[in-house]
Image (tube, rainbow, N blue to C red):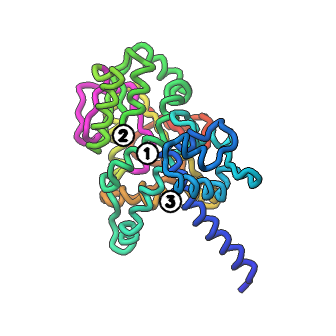
Amino acid sequence: MDNEKIKAFANTVYRDMAGAMAVGMADVGTRTGLFRAMAGKGGMDAAELTKATGLQMRYVDEWLRGMAAAEYLTYAPDDQTYTLPDEHAYLLASEGSDHFTGGLFRFAPVLLSKVSEVSEAFKTGGGVKFDEFGEDCVHAVDMINAGTYDQRFSGYWLASMPDVIAKLEKGARVLDVGCGVGRVSLNIARHFPNCDVVGLDPDAASIRHARAAAGQAGLSDRIEFVCGSTRDYAPASGFDLITACDCVHDFAAPIGTLAEIRQLLAPDGTLFIVEPKASDRVEDNIHPIGAMYYGFSLFHCMTQSLANGGPGLGTCMGPAKTSALLGEAGFGQIETLPIKSLTNAFYQAKL
């Protein structure tokens, strides 16, 4: 064996273990407000940060040391102060923005808590169902998507389909499949007050949060949230726009569910799909986002589909498979939309 290769791979293992610990420490920084307290403040020592946050100094001091070791913070040895660079604060202390990364830190512990169950599924089949991840998972997924959906969905993403925008402005019927806690539904209702919006999701906890959010936003009279699936949902008429955001790859019966969605569309309606941006070829996914997405798949997306008897398409399903599924489900017009995004891919499909 090549000793240099052994040493190089050992460094890779330590790097990845360090990354896992950094994610945990970063989640603590998000939960406790440590990053927010440091943003724009320049160098701070442990005592100053403890005073600013009201937290326990021994924990704050160790957290600062760890985040400096992970290069999330910079350290000045002469005065023993730590700084959160503005460029880092842009990602770490920007709650509500479309570039906040705190949701990723919250998601990782949720997924890794199911390592035992997923490992057992390697032997016995099946997997971990969505509701088994608990409400921490619901909140983590919402944290990942919240800023992006709030700031980009209607003003940028839907704007790539001018004919759809025209319908929404006049007043259209909209169905959000896999609505989760209702971010997309609420966004559409806010931007297009003439529309009737329905959010559909089989997870009761998510629907409960969605209804509460609609009430807080004063939109309960214009949004209906339904706990159920496309199989048992029977509206009085078809929808002009159906959205399916980050959920097609999770479906237990993807072709059947897409066919049911097709049946729910009005004759001239549009299905808008958002999926994780991944290549059809493994070799093109060998990069940090690809590795992250395969982890998401193994510990969340793929396993929940398999747990429900599905094919386990996985997070990195890719554009070729997505288009093929839409075609098999009976859609005649399928288009990949030229929307710029580092992490998402976008499709529209019509009858």
Residue type highlighted by circle 1? Val
Q: CA distance from mark 2 to mark 3?
A: 21 Å
- The residue depicted at 42 percent of the width and 25 percent of the height is 188
Left or right: where 174 falls relative to 88: left
Secondary structure of the residue carrying numbered label 3:
helix
Residue 133: quarter of image:
bottom left
The front one of 119 and 157 is 119
Q: Which mark is residue 141?
A: 1
Secondary structure of the residue carrying numbered label 1:
helix
Left or right: where 158 falls relative to 179: right
The front one of 67 and 304 is 67
Residue type highlighted by circle 3? Gly
Residue 159: quarter of image:
top right
Left or right: where 11 falls relative to 235: right
- The residue depicted at 52 percent of the width and 42 percent of the height is 53
> Does residue 8 show up magenta in the picture?
no
Location of residue 235 with respect to 24 vertically, above or below: above
Q: Which quadrant holds the C terminus? A: top left
Q: Which quadrant holds the N terminus? A: bottom right
Give the residue at mark 3: 295
Q: Is residue 83 visible?
A: yes
Location of residue 239 with respect to 302 vertically, above or below: above
Task: Measuring from the top left, give residue 248's x and y in whole percent.
Answer: 42, 46
Q: Nearer the viewer, mark 3 or mark 1?
A: 1
Q: Nearer the viewer, mark 2 or mark 1?
A: 1
Range drawn in magenta: 222-250
Q: Is tag 2's residue or tag 3's residue first in the polypeptide sequence?
A: 2
Give the residue at mark 2: 180
Near mark 3 (Cα within 10 A), the count class, few <14, some 14-19 or many ≥20, is some
Residue type highlighted by circle 2? Gly
